[in-house]
Image (cartoon, helix red, strand yellow):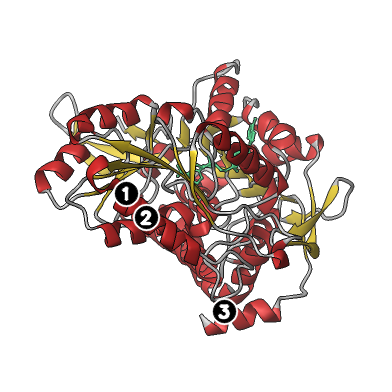
Amino acid sequence: WQPFSESVQAFARHQWQAGPIINGAAVIDSGNTVAVTAPYDRRESVGSVTFASAEQVNEALSIAAQSYQQWSSRPAAERAQCLLRLADLLEDHTGELVALCHREAGKTIQDSIDEIREAVDFCRFYANQATEEFSQPKPVMGFDGTTRQLSYQGRGVFACISPWNFPLAIFLGQVSAALVAGNTVVAKPAEQTSLIAFRAIELMLEAGVPAGAIQLLPGTGAEVGAPLTADNRIAGVAFTGSTETAQRINRSLAARDCEPVPFIAETGGQNAMIVDSTALPEQVVRDVVRSAFASAGQRCSALRVLFIQQDIADRVIGLIKGAMAELSVGRPELHSTDVGPVIDATARDKLQTHIQSLKNQATLVAQASVPVSCQHGDFVPPSAFEIPSIDILKNEHFGPILHIVRFKASELDQVIDHINQTGFGLTMGVHSRNERTYSHIERRARVGNCYINRDQVGAVVGVQPFGGQGLSGTGPKAGGPHYLYRFTQDRVEA
Ligand code: NAD
């Protein structure tokens, strides 16, 4: 931790600049340039970013389309080598990247370190998987009993559209999977974290990915993302972000006058945890507080709705109050900080509006305070409310707000069904010492990842892949055995 906190100091005044990267050339300061400031203190300048113009979107797509044959015909192992070199470069630049994640995205030092670790893991995992699985065709039986060769190749130009909450890991996870599978890529990072994406693509070019294979288009969803997904040259889309945006992209792809293409969407959740009366209250509270408030509640896996069995509800809620009184909200580089800022003023205002509306229809359990020293940043006080029913939550509230619902033992199946009926299916947590109960919940819950007797945070690339069902995503899970295949087309040689 110490060396990284020193690198945050070393880059404390650094100003980064970013813009589109087209055919290997960065286009900076060519017009539509916006200032980037730190989420924890808007008076602090971090640099500036030039957003892509409509002409640049078109140019990037043309170059990516022209470069496809050359890149896809390279052996998978050669493409993978570029990712392995990128992973090494990311490690070499960890200090700068930690500073960048911290200053542009407002992440704590530990979250920033985890972020870079995960990005490195994605690059190595997909590189190794592609080398093992796509280097040689696989023998299959033909109709006439002879052996035929099954091979995998890229599909064309992939659009990779990513969110700000994992600005390096998810961004590079998508891009590296698409590239190593043999596609060329046009990448559109979240507008809030363009500097991080820009630095990642600079390192990718340094690692040997050819200039034609990867194009970067910073900009807003409306101005850059939408025209990208409406374009017939796109042969597939990898998207991570809100369910609403995924639905918009789905409609845009369906309206195109060309062949249908794969759409890999990893989206939002209404993640619940169920706690029965056999659970250990102290352990529950530790895991609830971490699941709901770590990363200021801005993890897609974060706990939003806690269902507590009536018999232990008073005790658990009392302990939650106590734990929340200890939560320290503050600048994310401080070791003592538990909860940092949210990503921007838009997110802050939306969350504040939700807190205000809950005050009219729910009971405030606890609210941590935001110190005066944070007044120039976008902070939201971590808050917990007892609500009458999950039905009052129509959308995902992507921040440090916990909703609590009590239930009776006889209502367990109704609770699970109620959670399933939200249509979301990303994560669920269970706290119970009764094996029959937690196995029953795990089987009946319609979610991608179920966490038992632990916090609801975390995925491990290649070990515990992550992804949702229903409104939470199409699958296959990122970092899992099937993800790369969605970026390929398979062909049996005659
Ligand atoms: P968002 O949907 O607002 O934006 C995601 C990306 O889509 C951004 O790059 C944005 O510019 C782009 N975009 C917006 N409108 C577009 C359009 N019409 N066409 C094309 N692109 C468009 O999401 P966000 O606020 O950046 O991220 C937070 C959301 O991401 C939360 O809902 C969270 O749950 C979800 N998320 C899910 C996972 C997962 O693995 N399931 C992981 C991380 C985040």
Q: Residue at left 64%, top 71%?
A: 99
Q: Residue at left 29%, top 38%?
A: 150
Separation of residues labelled 2 and 1 (CA atoms) = 6 Å
Relative to 418, 386 lies left or right: right
Mark drawn on residue 314? 1
Q: The residue under label 1 is which amino acid type? A: Asp
**Is 254 located above or below residue 78 in the figure?**
above
Percent from the top left, x then y, of residue 39?
70, 58
Mark drawn on residue 4? 3
Percent from the top left, x then y, of residue 293?
48, 55
Q: Residue at left 72%, top 68%?
A: 373
Separation of residues labelled 3 and 2 (CA atoms) = 37 Å
Question: Considering only order in the chain, which callout, 2 or 3, is on the residue closer to the N terminus?
Answer: 3
Relative to 16, 209 lies left or right: left
What kind of element bears circle 2?
helix
Mark drawn on residue 318? 2
What kind of element bears circle 1?
helix
Instruction: Look at the numbered discs 2 and 1 and tell me whether their residues touch, using CB distance below 8 Å.
Output: yes
Instruction: Look at the numbered discs 3 and 1 and tell me whether their residues touch, using CB distance below 8 Å.
Output: no
Q: The residue under label 3 is which amino acid type? A: Phe
What kind of element bears circle 3?
helix
Which image quarter: residue 328? Answer: bottom right
Q: Is residue 407 visible?
A: yes
Question: Considering only order in the chain, which callout, 1 or 3, is on the residue closer to the N terminus?
Answer: 3
Q: Residue at left 22%, top 58%?
A: 280
Circle 1 packing at 10 Å, graded few (<14), some (14-19), many (20+), is few
Q: Nearer the viewer, residue 417 or 384?
A: 384
Q: Is residue 457 visible?
A: no
Between disc 3 and disc 1, the foreground one is: 1
Separation of residues labelled 3 and 1 (CA atoms) = 41 Å
